[in-house]
Amino acid sequence: MEDSPSDVRLMREALSAHNSSHELLVVTDGEQAVRFLRHEPPYTDSPRPDLVFLDLNLPRLDGRDVLSMMKADPALRSIPVIVLTTSESDQDVHNAYDLHANCYIRKPGDFDEFLRIVRACEDFWFNIVRLPQ
C-alpha cells in the first residue's frame, strides 16, 4: 500500500532483479487498501495478500488506520505487515508496534539499499518463516 509511483517502481524493480515469483499488487490510498483487504467493490476478486508493505503516510486514510483495522480484524490480523516508510520518528515506530506491525523499516535513500531490504524481506517472509494459509 503505497502512494508514491517512484517507490512502487523501485519495489517492482527490486522484485524483478531478485527474480521473484511473487505478484506485487498495489493500492495507492488507505481507503483502497481497506476495500482491497475486505474484498469490497471494485476489489471483490482480490486475493488475500501473503504479506503487506505499508506506508504510514497514505492519502484518504492514514496507514496507521489501515494497520489498526487489519490487526483488529480476525480475518486479516495474521497477515504480516511490514511498515516501510520515510518516517524516522520514534513515536511512529512505537505506534506501529503498538498496532502490531510485524516490523518497521525506514525507506532507504538509494536503490541498492532498497534492493537489499526487499530481498531480505522476501527471503525472510517467504523462505524462512512459515505463514498461515
Image: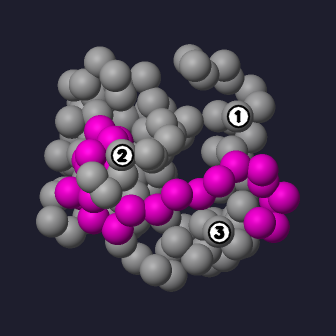
Residue 56 sits inside the magenta stretch: no
Q: Of residues 27 and 97, which is closer to you in this image?
A: 27
Residue placed under numbered mark 1 in the picture = 126
| Magenta: main secondary structure | loop
Residue placed under numbered mark 2 in the picture = 44
Q: CA distance from mark 2 to mark 3?
A: 24 Å
Q: Residue at x 35, y 68 (%)?
A: 28
Colouring rule applied to residues: one colour
Dots 2, 1 in contact, CB < 8 A? no
Left/right of residue 32 with respect to residue 108 in the rendered view: left
In front of the other: label 2 or label 3? 2
Q: Residues within 10 Å of mark 1 (few under 14, many from 20)?
A: some
Looking at the rendered structure, the number of numbered marks drawn on it comes to: 3
Compared to residue 41, the image places residue 49 above or below, namely above
Compared to residue 59, the image places residue 121 above or below, namely above
Q: Residue at x 78, y 50 (%)?
A: 21
- Coordinates of residue 131 in the picture (x, y in percent): 60, 22
Compared to residue 121, the image places residue 85 above or below, namely below
Q: Is disc 2 placed on a helix, strand or loop?
A: loop
Q: CA distance from mark 2 to mark 1?
A: 25 Å
Dots 1, 3 in contact, CB < 8 A? no
- Coordinates of residue 12 in the picture (x, y in percent): 65, 68
Residue placed under numbered mark 3 in the picture = 12
Q: CA distance from mark 1 to mark 3?
A: 17 Å
Left/right of residue 98 with respect to residue 123 in the rendered view: left
Give the magenta-colored segment's residue range.
16-40
Q: Of residues 79 and 40, which is closer to you in this image?
A: 40
Q: Residues within 10 Å of mark 2 (few under 14, many from 20)?
A: few
Q: Quadrant of residue 24?
A: bottom right
